[in-house]
Image (cartoon, rainbow, N blue to C red):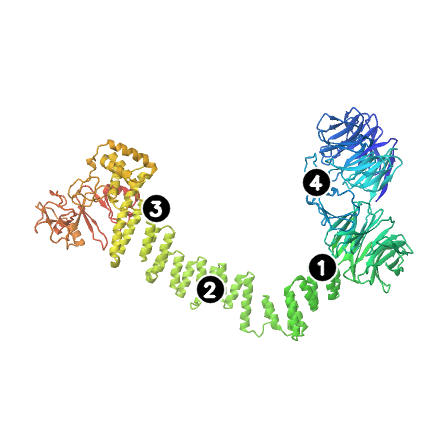
Amino acid sequence: MRAVLTWRDKVEQCIYDLAFKPDGTQLILAAGNRLLVYDTSDGTLLQPLKGHKDTVYCVAYAKDGKRFASGSADKSIIIWTSKLEGILKYTHNDSIQCVSYNPVTHQLASCSSSDFGLWSPEQKSVSKHKSSSKITCCSWTNDGQYLALGMSNGVISIRNKNGEEKVKIERPGGSLSPVWSICWNPSSRWENIWMIRENEDAEDVIVNRYFQEIPSILKSTVYSSQGSEAEEEEQEEEDDSPRDGNSEEHNDILAVADWGQKLSFYQLSGKQIGKDRSLNFDPCCISYFTKGEYILVGGSDKQVSLFTKDGVRLGTVGEQNSWVWTCRVKPDSNYVVVGCQDGTISFYQLIFSTVHGLYKDRYAYRDSMTDVIVQHLITEQKVRIKCRELVKKIAIYKNRLAIQLPEKILIYELYSDDSADMHYRVKEKIVKKFECNLLVVCADHIILCQEKRLQCLSFSGVKEREWQMESLIRYIKVIGGPAGREGLLVGLKNGQILKIFVDNLFAIVLLKQATAVRCLDMSASRNKLAVVDENDTCLVYDIHTKELLFQEPNANSVAWNTQCEDMLCFSGGGYLNIKASTFPVHQQKLQGFVVGYNGSKIFCLHVFSMSAVEVPQSAPMYQYLDRKMFREAYQIACLGVTDTDWRELAMEALEGLEFETAKKAFTRVQDLRYLELINSIEDRKKRGETDNDLFLADVFSYQGKFHEAAKLYKRSGHENLALDMYTDLCMFEYAKDFLGSGDPKETKMLITKQADWARNINEPKAAVEMYISAGEHAKAIEISGSHGWVDMLIDIARKLDKAERGPLLMCAQYFKKLDSPGYAAETYLKVGDLKSLVQLYVDTKRWDEAFALGEKHPEFKDDIYVPYAQWLAENDRFEEAQKAFHKAGRQGEAVRVLEQLTHNAVVESRFNDAAYYYWMLSMQCLDMAQDPAQKDVMLDKFHHFQHLAELYHGYQTIHRYTEEPFSFDLPETLFNISKFLLHSLTKATPLGISKVNTLFTLAKQSKALGAYKLARHAYDKLRGLQIPARIQKSIELGTLTIRSKPFHDSEELVPLCYRCSTNNPLLNNLGNVCINCRQPFIFSASSYEVLHLVEFYLEEGITDEEAVALIDLEAPRHQRESKWQETTAQSPPGFQTLRLDETMDSMGDDDPFTAKLSFEQGSSEFVPVVVNRSVLRSMSRRDVLIKRWPPPLQWQYFRSLLPDASITMCPSCFQMFHSEDYELLVLQHACCPYCRRRIDDTGP
């Protein structure tokens, strides 16, 4: 380190304080009762500022550069703007000793002999606080949270922003050692961690393998000078601190200088760091560099001393003629200004020289003046060695490291021989002061260079040899050798270059040149020597012949490649120059000095940093390739080139038929394809092939040089290989040139391959045309179909012969996929595949065409109707699906569909639908009963389903009444239905029908219509059932209120038997039949009233057709006497028959259906009414209703006893209705309410 005076000025008054403007352009000095403003660039006095009446003791600039403040013995503070205008003034009770601006809030602290004040731009008043002693100095922490005050009684008081004392530090000297200057370290980086330990030797080594800024996990490893095992040194625990921020405790370090001639350091908590440092003079000022790495201290010794941040003295900045009262560092620079008692202002520039050493990939350099960092240039690992003294010289060689300190030389060695090991330990130390220009270390010696003299010392400090040179030594380098016998390369100012062995007194002159030596290096084989002289010329000599091989200009340093004999690099003029053999120089931009060259890495020193630059060796490799020197080019490539360069080398070697080099290069780029080619060629050569043209043709074809390959194939007589190559490459126009005598087979093969190529390159239309011309119809159809070209497909299909079923069926399949069923049908007809045609119609849902085809070909009936029924079912058209299944003869599926529909309807409480589906089921069973094998079973099911249909049809009204809020049904209808259901549900109750709802409805309507006895019976029945909560109260209330009603039913509600005219009770134990004659009641399917109909049976021998014909005769009636006679002859066993006996020639007027019987039915068995032909003739057609059941059922005949009251029967389901009710329901629903027969349907 040296200080260069930049400018100096002198005033008449003592310079008590000074301050830089934050941007460094101006300097404010306190001189007498004035402020002097200087331009820092040249020392020009810009302006004196007058405002104080007495001596100005202190000055401070705000961090934002907007204002500065001055304090004077006149007890006042003046605030000045950056435009040098005073804007504010306030006073204290005593003279002002120091001022300091808060770096964050710009709050100003002003301190006098008895108090201190805090002023901020936002406040109009100044808050003042008393002090127990005279305040001599003050300083804010970096974050502006705390203010440190130094006092004349030796106390340091740390206050918060409000002036409250948080920490008090009492120095041992007390008032005998007044604190004269304090300053907080401005750095906030983790390097400020202090590792000073008591009684610690200076040669201890601090190792951090990766040297990363991770303060939260930082640990250091300490090695003693004896090389003992490493001990983990844990970070010091943080003491209780007054600060409340999140930053680390050690980020705030306070440097204290007192007139007890001590320099001390404290943490924010008040804990002292390390020991006091003795200064041997009275310090008047202390100041940190901007980044906190160095400290300036000036005082009674009339000079400014430079210290490290931990208090190690490094040297003198500038000697003065009087006490130094103030010194400051220009912000963010190495400029220092000094103010003295005699008024001298000196402005210095500090120049820090680079102290470093390099051996191969290890670089050692000085850091912070007292530390040595060893950097591995390849792995980027770093190790820091803390010497805590000024490092003067550094030398490194193999596993040795020498560090010269002011009073000793330390020699370190690596722990192991591992090339990546970075653990150093002290091997020896020479406690002796040396003066030397250069320092070199060997395995067992150190070499000191002192101008013209070289001294060789052992590690114990004993001088073993000395060499005296003719001229000044300009360059020295260890070039290797056995331990204790290393060779040194020495360059002198007179141009002489020598080789010296450390165990030999005699120096060997290698050569002498006319110009002074600046830099030297020897090639790896020690056959060539490169020299850079004082004229910036790089000269290369042959050591043995002393011949100058070549020279290059603009060089400041040179280095041979340690891995290649014929390659060196030199730097100069901002360029890096690489030279291989005698080829021209390759240049690229590079700042700095070349100091080493290893493989493809060039080690470059730029300013203070060493870096390893990866330089591809492409240029020299291509220089060798141009001369077909493949082996040499491969050696250069091994040093480091790009993958592209490796590939180029491989290709060039392959074309030059240098297969060994090509194989190595292709292996490097992992190109298996070319490696297979090389292996193939080598195998062929082993088998005796020697035609290099054929080998080169294969190489050209692999490289894509097809025309050159074809020429070589033709020249070597292998035209077939050229044909195959062009064909594989789809270069068919060129392939035609190599066709033989026009063989059709070869031509077809070529066209087919051409079509394949057109297909692969997305030219499908061209491919189709080529396939057609080559007769490959299947491929043409496949391409056309996959692209949806229907027109092209139909053209192909129409041109094909019908015998070619395969391609035609492929066309038909594609037509189906492309939604062209018409073309598909045409194609199927062409090949006569009717089954596929049927399937086509089914798949495309073209049912009309399918039905028409089914009519012509009944054998496809199942193939049509079954899918049709399934399609209907999938589209929720279940009824049509059932019919289709039925039509297809799939009775089982038809029944299953209906059963599932019925079950779903019941579960979903759609009882009307359930009734309809049960009716359809019954009719289905009736249809199936025509099979004699199933007749009995199907008839039983028919009657069962008919019964269920009637029950669900009636229960729909009950369900609607009980579940919905409003009912549109008449009370009489509800009464009749519930009574009908009650009499019908004598056995098991079908799924979904609720007895509770039925009885509840019956009870309510019976009560409303006056059938109190029946209502009481219904309520009694309900008491034995589980009642839903929603009607619980209603039933309980009805049960109570019905007791107040008379115990009989209204006679108007009593049903009348129209056969025997007997009034039947409302509660009939026999069910829905007359209690007297057992005649079943016929109910209306809408109101469920008992209809005035009596069923009669035909006499044996009368057919249905004859009976209808007799009824249709409409014979006139005469007054005849007739009577009913009871007979048992010719009757079925166990049956009684009422027979109307008449004479053969006449018939009486009395009709068996209208005459009132005067006798009671004597038997409990039902006796049907049987009529003969004469009675049938007497009947009117309008009085008779006939249920024309299909076989195997018999027709049923009913006679209306009240002809004026019209009754209508549905011709489909044969349900009876009052005509008015039926017409109204048909108008509402447009169909029969029971079987849903449409009114426009003319069928039965």
In this rendering, which labeled residue sits more in front, label 2 or label 4?
Answer: 4
In this rendering, which labeled residue sits more in front, label 2 or label 1?
Answer: 1
As measured in the structure, the alpha-carbon distance from the residue carrying label 1 to the one carrying label 3 is: 83 Å
As measured in the structure, the alpha-carbon distance from the residue carrying label 3 to the one carrying label 2 is: 58 Å
Q: Which residue is mark 3?
A: 907
- Tell me the SS state at disc 2: helix
As measured in the structure, the alpha-carbon distance from the residue carrying label 2 to the one carrying label 4 is: 93 Å
Residue furthest to the right in view is 470
> Mark 3 or 2 closer to N-term?
2
Amino acid carrying mark 2 in the image: Ile
Mark 2–mark 4 CB contact (< 8 Å) = no
Q: Which mark is residue 796?
A: 2
Q: Which residue is mark 4?
A: 237
Figure quadrant of residue 869: bottom left
Q: Is residue 317 above or below residue 923?
A: above
As measured in the structure, the alpha-carbon distance from the residue carrying label 2 to the one carrying label 1 is: 60 Å
Within-10-Å neighbours for mark 3: few <14, some 14–19, many 20+: few
Amino acid carrying mark 4 in the image: Glu
> Mark 2 or 4 closer to N-term?
4
Q: Which residue is mark 1?
A: 641
Within-10-Å neighbours for mark 4: few <14, some 14–19, many 20+: few
Amino acid carrying mark 1 in the image: Val
> Mark 4 or 3 closer to N-term?
4
Residue furthest to the top in view is 93
